Image (spheres, grey):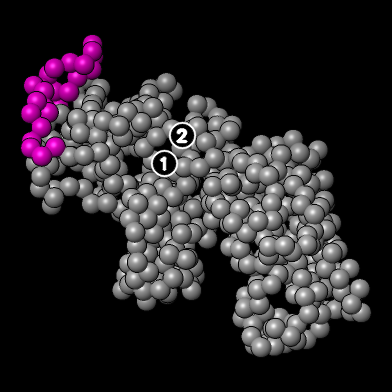
Amino acid sequence: MFSRSRMLSNAALVLLPLTAGLLTIGCPGLFPEPNEPNEPNKGNSGLTGKYVGSERCATCHNNVHFNWSQTLHARALETLENIGQDKNANCVGCHVVGFGQPGGFVDRATTDALAGVGCESCHGPGRDHVENVNDESLRPPKSIAAEICGQCHTGSHHPNYDDWATSKHARVTETPAEEFTEGLALNNCGKCHSGDFFYRATLNNETLADNALQGVPVEELHAVECAICHNPHARTGNAPTPEDGRDFQLRYPEVANPTPTNDVRAVTDPTRFNLCGQCHHDRGRTWQDSARPPHHSNQANFYIGEMPLPEDSDLLVQSRVSVHSFAVEQCATCHMYRQDFQSAQAPAISGHTFQVNESSCATSGCHPSLGQALAVKATLQTEIQNRLNDIANRLGDPATWEYTSNGGPNAAGQRNLPDWLKQVRFLYYYVLVDGSLGIHNPAYARDCLVAAQDLLTANGR
């Protein structure tokens, strides 16, 4: 794996492109006379530095500003005022614009326009840009780097960035990274392995050639950054159970319940799936394919009990939706268990390591206790692993049955393998690459492996 660690200076880069059109001339009336109060005890007499406030951005970027105004970022200072911490210098910096910097927030009476986490918190001071919108050199640079979010979403109270940085989402997987820098595979692998591709192709609707990242050093490539899952500009309503007025600003629904199917086009269609399933879905290899096993991204399909089958092929296993699909937050229930800060000894848990936390099994109401959940998990995973081992042992020498990429027969040899063996091999790998040893869909995992074992028995293995 390649990792990237480059903390950015405060407000050095923008998170996403400014999407509204720009004026072709300067903005008349953009800066009101000093000391014009917004309301009693609030004013902007100190708004004379490089920071101009989010209302000024709204002159050109009205849609983005309106959407932002509905988020908790827009009211971030209020959350401190409500608990009497609005004078705490340790807290204020992440709840206003430019605190402690020249021209930044001082107080409500003199710089009220800079209260809250505004546009310039992430996009940088805006005065030079708004005074000359035609000068491209004055426009904020664009970046999708998670370090921008990490300026505030860090530490024992909000360890989102710190946890994310330890996760696999923070790393560009070695093989595609090397291919991207060589000008290869970007349109195939970049959809899920390149934050740069997502930013440009998905968000900006650019048509990218496979060599769009050619020559970019691996350490400068972006992986699955915060803004790939979260929309920094808007409440989306895509979280089913946000607490304390939060929204999480998810780009895609956290919960989805598609009807299982075995159609190749459907099982590879990310629009059917929840947020995690945008990447964690099958790539369409069937039991007839011989070069490579199923891609290790079939978790969304496995969760709802479906697999891709060739046209006119008989079912290998009956579809069976997982009992875990009824978890309130589906994938996030176990992979993003959250807990607010309690003390220095019990800091907040953000869930952004994406590692399973079994505490959710009990707190979600699915299991009567953590101990019972752990026991059920251990029993199931032991059973599934034993069945996988049994199938591999009965298949024998991998050189006689494996996929070509895994040391099996060449293309000519693959054509001589019987269909029943290819089906056994596919079922074996379909469970294996899911990676949960049955937890994502216990009954479906068992059905797949029993079907493979029955095929082996029926053919004398």
Q: Is residue 25 located in the magenta-colored stretch of the structure?
A: yes
Q: Are marks 1 and 2 in contact (CB under 8 Å)?
A: yes
Residue 176 against residue 260 in the figure, above or below: below
Q: Position of residue 186 (x, y in %)?
A: 41, 67
Q: Position of residue 9 (x, y in %)?
A: 27, 51
* Lateral position of residue 241 relative to residue 215, left or right: right
Q: Residue furthest front?
A: 312
Disc 1 secondary structure class: loop
Q: Residues within 10 Å of mark 1 (few under 14, many from 20)?
A: some
Tell me what residue is drawn at x 48 percent, y 40 percent: 250
Residue 115 against residue 35 in the figure, above or below: below
* Lateral position of residue 213 relative to residue 383, left or right: left
Q: Which residue is mark 2?
A: 236
Q: Which residue is mark 1?
A: 231
Q: Residue furthest top?
A: 40
Tell me what residue is drawn at x 52 percent, y 36 percent: 238
Residue 222 visible in the snapshot? yes
Q: Position of residue 295 (x, y in %)?
A: 61, 66
**Which range of residues does the magenta coloring cover?**
23-46
Secondary structure, magenta segment, majority class: loop
Q: Quadrant of residue 326?
A: top right
Tell me what residue is drawn at x 58 percent, y 33 percent: 240
The kind of residue on which mark 2 rests is Thr
